[in-house]
Amino acid sequence: MFAFAFPPLDPVAASFGPLVIRWYALAYLAGFIIGWRYCLYLARQNTKGPAAELYDEFLTWAVIGVVLGGRIGYILFYQPDYYFSHPTEMAEVWHGGMSFHGGMLGVIAAAWLFTNRHKMSFFAFTDILACVTPIGLFLGRLANFVNGELYGRVTNVSWAIIFPRGGDQPRHPSQLYEAFLEGIVLFLILFWLSRKPKIRARIGFISGSFLFCYGLFRSVVEFFREPDQQLGFIYGGTTMGQLLCVPMMLFGLYIILWSEKRTKSRLK
């Protein structure tokens, strides 16, 4: 069976004595910087929305939300028994272990506190945050590929790859599937929505669209991605990622419908 060998990619971008800089960390850093600049661009384009200066201030809040939420989410969703038995390892993020769903909840909590502090519309603020999130997702999934982690299930497709951590069987490069759907495709969908004045006027519509589309794309890719070893398949062949996407998609649909209803009631 033909399969590509995993390319000779080093997870370490550079090292200076005991200081090691990994591509995964650089992906997070680049995601925050590029996303922040894109936030400023979108805020300045939409003069009726939140001021661009607010996103300058929120950057620190976002970093804290992603890191704390991502780590806590991973502990609670994926390895609660292990970490509750080894509590001193909970803070050792340099060993890996971050959850997107947890990071998303962390940013949502940070945005809720931030918008309440400034007495402004929560969804008007998150509509712009939603547009920039695919940037971080794209870079993060590329870093997962470089690390040779979160690989796919065994397959015989012509583009299969033999990952060093996945044994000697060819597997789906599911990290690249996610980079394409959750990163590029989702970015383009939200970019298109953000360019429509009528859509921007429907406060919350873009936020809801992000939640629904991400949940849909992630659920699809989970059919090709190897389940987490410590969890395996959960209910009826579903994975933890798919289960976490169900409430995400339902809540996204609810926000979209709420946005439509709110807009219609204002026009009456």
Image (cartoon, rainbow, N blue to C red):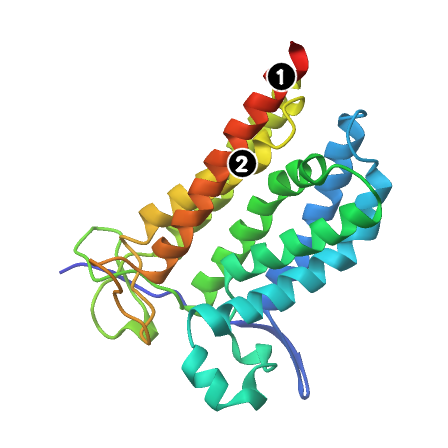
Q: Position of residue 266 (x, y in %)?
A: 67, 16
The residue under label 1 is which amino acid type? Ser
**In the rendering, at what x and y percent does residue 171 appear?**
25, 61
Q: Quadrant of residue 180?
A: top left
- Image quadrant containing the C terminus: top right
Q: Residue under circle 2?
A: 208
Q: Is residue 57 left or right of residue 29?
A: right
Near mark 2 (Cα within 10 A), the count class, few <14, some 14-19 or many ≥20, is many
Answer above or below: position of 81 versus 155: below
- Which mark, residue 265? 1
Point out which mark residue 148 bears.
none
* Residue located 34% across and 63% down the image: 151
Q: Residue at x 63, y 27 (%)?
A: 194
| Mark sitting earlier along the chain (1/2) | 2
Residue 71: quarter of image: bottom right
- The front one of 136 and 113 is 113
SS of the residue at dot 1? helix
When the figure is inspected, residue 82 is found, relative to residue 174, above or below; the finding is below
**Is 186 situated left or right of 223 in this image?**
right
Give the image location of residue 84, x and y in percent: 49, 85
The residue sitting at the left extreme is 1
Q: Amino acid at mark 2?
A: Gly
Q: Nearer the viewer, residue 97 or 120?
A: 120
